[in-house]
Image (cartoon, helix red, strand yellow):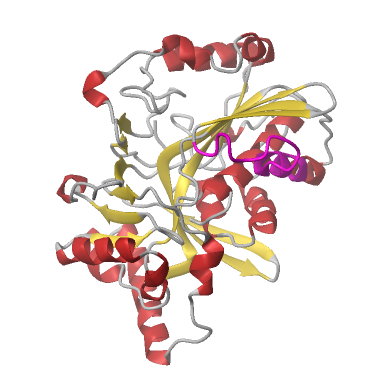
């Protein structure tokens, strides 16, 4: 992030919101609510591609910045105890053979606003989770903010948290990882510290219990994550700019605990060997050889074992792969992902499902300073003033 005053950043955010008309589900028909080039959103999600460095319960930008750069992370800090805004991407883990290791950041986002003040917490939620999640200290974002502040040795006794959610819950798109990473990133902003993404992954892993989704959420792009003792580690690789993703999201949820409970305690050695080879191949396919995606996304470790919990998802995976599309179960499911260069080839969504055309988010979580007085005066939703109707883009 650039070092700017809270007031100027608030104006920039408002101006960015006016550049894109907001749809009923919070997506923008054109422009980007943060003024970034992270993909062109459509009625069903986000499409378009992003060049490198340009422009809670389940698994699952600043234009011109790059992960870890001062421009993206606020190298001089945000100013202690200032209001902050956070944008955090959806993620998909596993990607077929990369079980509990691979992650991909996607251009669908939750947005958080945190305004410090008082001694308690006030939580407001719109979108997925509204009317379902806790609105007190037990809220996952609040817990992550507290953990982040403790790790930084900072204290913010009270704050107002507003969550504008767009990542579906319980669908394998990293909603819990987004909440955790978003909360920790907000803590860095509240403490006036530049974002340390590797440390964010470590802290998020401690809360989430596995680093695959949180790594992609924190760093963006394509990540490989592992544990070193009790510490979550990650390496970020640059995926091909021409790749895009189609997500098929059903109306039903699957709990990660349920999906994991179906996995056997041991698999045949031949299956493990085949899976290791495909995982290595997938690294090449995502970064340099997209023609290998069909072969590289074959899995022997988890997808078929989970069929009893999500029979429709596995049926869709088989159907899409039969059409020559690199389809996988996203995270613990039940969302199905197609990765490739031609998203328009992917079929329409089955009845009761939604189809989202997405890009690959290149930057991961982003934090901006915000104008606290403006946020409080407007009820935290300055973008509602720019709302316009787009009948041609309605869901």
Residue at position x 44%, y 52% from top? 171
* Residue 289 showing in the rendered view: no
Looking at the image, residue 235 lies above or below residue 146: below
Residue at position x 30%, y 72% from top? 298
Q: Is residue 240 left or right of residue 64?
A: left
Residue 195 forms part of the magenta stretch: no
Magenta residues, start to end: 128-147
Residue farthest toward the bottom in the current orientation of the protein: 269
Q: Is residue 153 left or right of residue 169?
A: right
Looking at the image, residue 387 lies above or below residue 313: above
**Residue 297: where, in percent of width, then height?**
31, 67
Q: Nearer the viewer, residue 389 or 325?
A: 389
Residue at position x 56%, y 65% from top? 257
Quarter of the rendering occupied by the N terminus: top right
Based on the displayed image, in which of its 4 quarters is residue 358 positioned?
A: top left
**Residue 10: where, in percent of width, then height?**
58, 14
Residue 136 forms part of the magenta stretch: yes
* Residue 194 showing in the rendered view: yes
Residue at position x 77%, y 25% from top? 81
**Residue 176: where, in percent of width, then height?**
57, 49
Q: Is residue 53 left or right of residue 58?
A: left
Quarter of the rendering occupied by the C terminus: top left
Q: Main secondary structure of the magenta part?
A: loop
Looking at the image, residue 174 lies above or below residue 394: below
Q: Is residue 300 left or right of residue 253?
A: left
Q: Count the numbered circles shown.
A: 0
Based on the displayed image, in which of its 4 quarters is residue 152 positioned?
A: top right
């Amino acid at each position: 992030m650039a070092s700017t005053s809270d007031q100027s950043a608030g104006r920039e955010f408002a101006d960015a919101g006016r550049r894109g008309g907001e749809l009923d589900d919070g997506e923008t028909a054109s422009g980007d609510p943060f003024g970034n080039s992270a993909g062109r959103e459509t009625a069903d999600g986000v499409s378009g591609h992003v060049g490198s460095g340009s422009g809670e319960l389940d698994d699952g930008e600043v234009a011109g910045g790059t992960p870890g750069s001062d421009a993206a992370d606020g190298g001089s800090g945000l100013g202690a105890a200032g209001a902050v805004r956070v944008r955090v991407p959806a993620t998909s883990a596993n990607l077929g053979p990369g079980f509990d290791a691979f992650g991909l950041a996607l251009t669908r986002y939750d947005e958080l606003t945190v305004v410090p003040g008082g001694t308690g917490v006030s939580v407001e939620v719109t979108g997925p989770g509204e009317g379902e999640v806790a609105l007190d200290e037990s809220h996952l974002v609040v817990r992550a903010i507290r953990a982040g502040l403790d790790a930084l040795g900072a204290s913010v006794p009270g704050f107002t948290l507003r969550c504008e959610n767009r990542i579906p819950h319980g669908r394998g798109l990293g909603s819990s990882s987004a909440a955790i990473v978003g909360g920790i990133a907000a803590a860095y902003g509240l403490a006036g510290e530049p974002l340390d993404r590797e440390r964010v992954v470590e802290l998020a892993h401690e809360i989430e219990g596995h680093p695959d989704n949180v790594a992609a959420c924190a760093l963006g792009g394509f990540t490989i994550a592992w544990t070193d003792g009790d510490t979550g580690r990650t390496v970020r690789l640059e995926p091909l700019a021409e790749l895009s993703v189609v997500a098929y999201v059903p109306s039903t949820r699957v709990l990660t605990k349920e999906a994991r409970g179906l996995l056997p305690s041991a698999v045949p050695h031949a299956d493990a060997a085949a899976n290791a080879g495909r995982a290595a191949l997938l690294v090449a396919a995502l970064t340099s050889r997209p023609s290998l995606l069909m072969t590289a996304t074959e899995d022997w470790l988890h997808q078929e074992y989970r069929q009893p919990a999500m029979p429709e998802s596995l049926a869709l995976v088989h159907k899409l792969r039969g059409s020559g599309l690199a389809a996988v179960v996203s995270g613990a499911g039940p969302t199905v992902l197609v990765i490739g260069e031609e998203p328009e080839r992917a079929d329409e969504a089955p009845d009761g499902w939604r189809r989202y055309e997405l890009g690959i988010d290149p930057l991961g979580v982003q934090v901006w300073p915000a104008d606290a007085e403006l946020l409080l005066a407007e009820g935290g939703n300055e973008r509602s003033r720019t709302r316009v109707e787009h009948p041609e883009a309605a869901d």
